[in-house]
């Protein structure tokens, strides 16, 4: 081959290699810019409304003027929540792992330098290129790719698991806010009645018709209720912060936002809520974390197959060329690793142990799910009984209050007696509401154990693998 042609071939090869190389692009993070973007998030962003309309059109028809219910707030969290961004980043890493696993080993280029001491010419050196191709044997590339594919499947299921956790956090925060609001209203009503009773007792004390002990007792009760109201106001503020955090927005984003608590005020009928055999079996086999753990186990299987294949060495095929004073010399070399000192026993043993660990992790997860379902079922049934008992007590208190009111209208009972009856009724209403909240919390725990929507049945989407905030569409950006 003429020297000019060899130079052109070498230059063209180098240019082709450089053209296929990736270049580094810096993406610095600015804490101030990122914090400002997070602090500016709202529930009326155009992209968010577009995402909601595309996800749940029937629910979002009235937005942004309508009330935000559990479903709409959940989708807002699926749009904003940074935990999902992290899960998507892990998914992208797993997807890149498949590209890495499918790569074939690059050949190596060597130059052999030969010296002929007996050569009579002035330059007794010859230089020849040798290209070494690595040939992977026993399906190593296939096992490596299968391991990466199972890891990608696990990352997808972990994204879905994160999505459910986001929903769970929103539901818990909204339930806590609903409970705090209702308890505050009930406590304020009791405080108003207690103030009326204190005023009546003080008037009686002034004319000698009541003792100072009676007055002191009612003043203490009023002070306790006043403190309870302060605590409930603080709890309601904390619940608002908890809800904003669960959604992924600052708490000021909830200012002026109308919230709907219909999911908790009118939950599904009791016939739909107990963990039936079908729901139990579905949870044990189809929960997203179960599927993720199963994919991890399959990845460990492929990893073991890969390490077993590594017992057998790869082959190296090395064709070469040497030009010697007009003579074209072609070379072909074979090579491979000699498994003399070890046959990959250590990595194989490690892969066997990791597969056993993955199997134990899967079994432990199913055991925890069984325990959570059983505990949730027992708690739900227990709270249903407590709620029924509270309903009976409330009915009795209402009858007594009605009787005393009739006696008051007939002049057979005084006003302090009537106010005391109203206080008793208000106290039992508060206790009954506590039983109701406990029942809703038990239902929420059962919902998490089953990983099945119970407060809004059937409304659970597939979590988008691409960040909805970065999808290019015709909507204006947020």
Image (cartoon, rainbow, N blue to C red):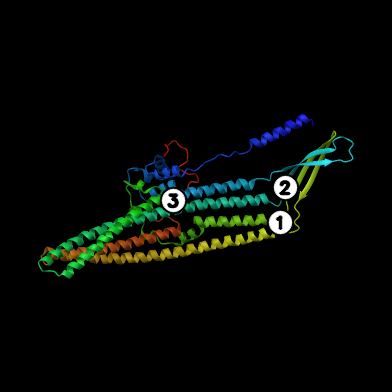
Quarter assignment of residue 48: top left
For image coordinates 47% across by 65% down, the residue present is 371
Residue 135 shows which numbered tag?
A: 2
Of the numbered discs 1 and 3, the one sitting upstream in the chain is: 1
Residue 217 shows which numbered tag?
A: none
Q: CA distance from mark 1 to mark 2?
A: 15 Å
Q: Which residue is mark 3?
A: 460
Of the numbered discs 2 and 3, the one sitting upstream in the chain is: 2
Question: Which quadrant is home to the C terminus?
Answer: top left
Residue 311 shows which numbered tag?
A: 1
For image coordinates 70% across by 52% down, the residue present is 138
Question: Which quadrant is home to the N terminus?
Answer: top right
Q: Residues within 10 Å of mark 1 (few under 14, many from 20)?
A: some
Q: CA distance from mark 1 to mark 3?
A: 47 Å
Q: Is residue 424 visible?
A: no
For image coordinates 41% across by 62% down, the residue present is 274
Q: CA distance from mark 2 to mark 3?
A: 48 Å
- Nearest to the observer: residue 84 or residue 4: 4
Secondary element under disc 1, as helix, strand or loop, is loop
Of the numbered discs 1 and 2, the one sitting upstream in the chain is: 2
Q: Find out whether the residues at labels 1 and 2 contact each other: C-beta distance under 8 Å.
A: no
Secondary element under disc 2, as helix, strand or loop, is strand
Indicate left or right for 364 with 187 as reference. Answer: right
Secondary element under disc 3, as helix, strand or loop, is loop
Q: Find out whether the residues at labels 2 and 3 contact each other: C-beta distance under 8 Å.
A: no
Report x, y in % for residue 376: 42, 63
Q: Nearer the viewer, mark 2 or mark 3?
A: 2
């Amino acid at each position: 081959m003429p020297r000019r042609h060899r130079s052109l071939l070498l230059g063209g090869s180098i240019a082709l290699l450089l053209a296929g190389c990736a270049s580094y692009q810096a993406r610095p993070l600015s804490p101030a810019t990122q914090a400002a973007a997070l602090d500016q998030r709202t529930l009326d962003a155009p992209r968010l409304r577009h995402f909601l309309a595309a996800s749940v059109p029937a629910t979002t028809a009235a937005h942004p003027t309508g009330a935000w219910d559990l479903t709409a707030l959940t989708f807002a969290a699926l749009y904003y929540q940074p935990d999902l961004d992290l899960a998507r980043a892990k998914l992208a890493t797993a997807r890149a792992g498949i590209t890495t696993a499918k790569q074939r080993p690059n050949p190596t280029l060597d130059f052999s330098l030969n010296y002929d001491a007996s050569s009579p010419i002035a330059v007794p050196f010859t230089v020849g290129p040798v290209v070494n191709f690595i040939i992977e044997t026993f399906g190593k590339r296939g096992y490596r790719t299968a391991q990466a594919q199972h890891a990608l499947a696990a990352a997808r299921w972990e994204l879905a698991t994160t999505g459910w956790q986001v929903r769970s956090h929103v539901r818990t925060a909204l339930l806590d806010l609903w409970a705090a609001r209702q308890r505050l209203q009930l406590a304020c009503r009791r405080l108003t009645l207690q103030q009326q009773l204190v005023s009546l007792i003080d008037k009686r004390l002034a004319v000698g018709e009541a003792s100072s002990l009676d007055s002191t007792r009612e003043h203490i009760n009023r002070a306790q209720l006043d403190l309870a109201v302060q605590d409930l106001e603080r709890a309601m503020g904390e619940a608002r912060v908890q809800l904003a955090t669960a959604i992924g927005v600052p708490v000021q984003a909830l200012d002026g936002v109308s919230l709907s608590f219909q999911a908790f005020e009118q939950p599904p009928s009791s016939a739909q809520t107990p963990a039936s055999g079908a729901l139990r079996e579905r949870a044990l086999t189809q929960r997203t974390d179960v599927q993720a753990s199963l994919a991890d186990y399959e990845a460990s299987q492929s990893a073991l197959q890969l390490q077993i294949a590594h017992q057998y060495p790869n082959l190296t095929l090395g064709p070469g060329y040497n030009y010697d004073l007009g003579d074209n010399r072609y070379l072909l070399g074979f090579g491979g690793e000699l498994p003399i000192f070890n046959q990959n026993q250590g990595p194989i043993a490690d892969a066997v142990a990791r597969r056993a660990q993955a199997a134990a992790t899967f079994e432990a997860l199913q055991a925890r799910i069984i325990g959570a379902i059983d505990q949730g079922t027992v708690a739900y049934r227990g709270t249903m009984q407590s709620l029924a008992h509270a309903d009976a007590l409330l009915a009795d208190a209402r009858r007594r209050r009605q009787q005393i009111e009739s006696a008051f209208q007939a002049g057979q009972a005084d006003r302090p007696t009537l106010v005391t009856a109203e206080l008793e009724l208000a106290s039992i209403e508060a206790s009954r509401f506590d039983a109701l909240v406990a029942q809703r919390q038990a239902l929420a725990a059962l919902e998490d154990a089953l990983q099945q929507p119970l407060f809004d049945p059937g409304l659970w989407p597939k979590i988008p693998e691409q960040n909805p905030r970065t999808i290019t569409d015709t909507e204006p950006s947020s």
